[in-house]
Image (cartoon, rainbow, N blue to C red):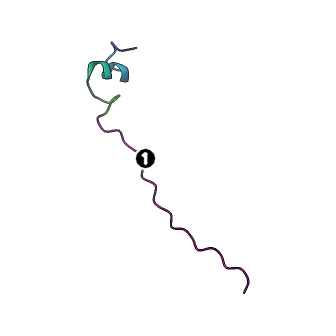
Amino acid sequence: MGRGDARTRKGKIFKGSYGKTRPHKVKKAAPARPVAAKAPARRGS
C-alpha cells in the first residue's frame, strides 16, 4: 500500500489518475448560513 498501489490516494497521486479514492472535485460541507444578530432583550417595563 503505497505509491505503487493505484487503489490508494497516494498511488493515484503518483500515477496521476482519479477515481473513487481521489475524486476531481472535493465535496465541501454545506456553507454556514449567516445568522442574523438578534436585538438585545429590553430590560424593565
Which region shows up in magenta? 24-45
| Amino acid on which the number 1 mark rests in the picture | Ala
Taking the image as shown, residue 35 lies to the left or right of residue 44, namely: left
In front of the other: 27 or 42: 42
| Residue 26 is a magenta residue | yes
Residue 38 in the image: above or below residue 43: above
Q: Quadrant of residue 3?
A: top left
Q: Residue farthest to the bottom?
A: 45
Q: Secondary structure at mark 1?
A: loop
Q: Position of residue 39 (x, y in %)?
A: 58, 74
Q: Position of residue 7 (x, y in %)?
A: 34, 20
Q: Residue at x 39, y 44 (%)?
A: 28
Residue at mark 1: 29
Q: What kind of secondary structure does the magenta stretch mostly adopt?
A: loop
Query: Which quadrant is home to the C terminus?
Result: bottom right
Q: Position of residue 5 (x, y in %)?
A: 34, 15
Q: Residue at x 47, y 61 (%)?
A: 34
